[in-house]
Image (cartoon, rainbow, N blue to C red):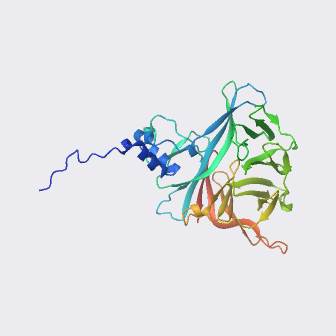
Amino acid sequence: MAEPVTKENKTIPDWTKLPEELLQTINGKLNCFDVVHAHSVSTKWRSAFPYPASLLRSSYSLPTYPVEKDGLCSLEKIPFVLVIVPTPTDDESASEFSMGLVGRDESADYMEAPSPLQCSLRMKMNKSDPKWMNVIGSQILSLGHRYRMVCWDPNGLRTTHRNAAILPLSREGERGRGEFVVLRSYYGILLVLTSAIRKWVRFPGVRSSSCTGLVTFRGRFYASFSNEGIYVIHPYSLVAVPLMMPPNFTHGSNHLITAGDDELFLVNKNTSITRRVTCRVGKLVGLEWVEVDELGDRVLFVAKDANVCCSANQLPDGCGVTGDSVLFTKRAGEDTYFYKYGPPEVPNENVVGEWRSSKESRVRFLDSQQAFAFRVES
């Protein structure tokens, strides 16, 4: 006769009491987002694993500008992610994506999160307070980090400037001494600060035209200016050298996009009087831009202060997003399409091909303020 199952037999072992060495081994097998999900289960799970260093927001305290000692200012390094949200089984032709900044939840208790707790992510959409987003079954991709300047005036008013970049000052083969240099665009004015002087000054060697973009690539700064092209800036000498621009990139807006440390892309967007949008793509080769007609598996997202790149090979099959494409973000409620290279939309004997709206998958933007949420319909 089988023995009755007792309450003691049903007790689930508390694996958080495993030896610390074994927990560290388990933690090493998980990616950073698996750890975030584990943190959301309970306070015991949260205490069992250290928060992933790759998702921490690091910051530097800096002087304010234009009036020093007038308020507070810091430079924040914030992780940027892409979330592929599972689609309902009755709507397999559409996929939803959310793209934006994430950070650690400092609340003492995760019980405030909605059910299911196991997979939740807090994102700031529109101008509202951050909201919980159920990402159970979602795929989350890291798109690197973004920098932003956060300043408080003496009355506590907070302002944010997203056009900023930082590089450490440590030469190859020598240990860094914690020194760095920061560039930022302050209402279009390019400013520079070094850790040695800790004072903002206007960057020398460039004209007064508005600085529209800043990125770092292979240990150098790259800055774009309206009507003046792109400059490469060495962090030690702080000398700005103009890059040779393709002949067709002199009009419209130029957008810098890094693909890790592999490649640096330049996307030119031009809108005609008839509202027709044309697009050109360049790649940095040496000290000049070379126009290209293919991107391989890469997808370039062009947004205000948030230009990013990802590999389509990391995305689910049939999600409507494929490589060799460029997407310009739109306002919430507006539709658009991915740009791909192909025969010109308007026949021209002097034009072999162009980047044009592909009409393959319609993209509707659900939000385009603090984060970017969009729906792709195949």
Can residue 367 be seen here? The reply is: no
Seen from the viewer's position, the closer of residues 121 and 16 is 16
Quarter of the image with the N terminus in it: bottom left
Percent position of residue 171, x then y: 73, 45
Q: Is residue 65 above or below residue 326?
A: above
Quarter of the image with the C terminus in it: bottom right
Can residue 242 be seen here? The reply is: yes
In this rendering, the count of numbered labels is 0
Q: Is residue 283 above or below residue 159?
A: below
Q: Residue at x 62, y 39 (%)?
A: 58
Q: Is residue 2 left or right of residue 108?
A: left
Which residue is most to the left?
1
Which residue is most to the front?
173
Determine which quarter of the picture holds residue 285. Answer: bottom right
Seen from the viewer's position, the closer of residues 206 and 232 is 232
Q: Is residue 76 above or below residue 95?
A: above
Q: Residue at x 84, y 61 (%)?
A: 248
Percent position of residue 77, x then y: 64, 41
Seen from the viewer's position, the closer of residues 161 and 171 is 171
Percent position of residue 360, x then y: 64, 68
Q: Is residue 348 above or below residue 281?
A: below
Percent position of residue 67, x then y: 78, 27
Q: Residue at x 62, y 57 (%)?
A: 364
Determine which quarter of the picture holds residue 326. Answer: bottom right
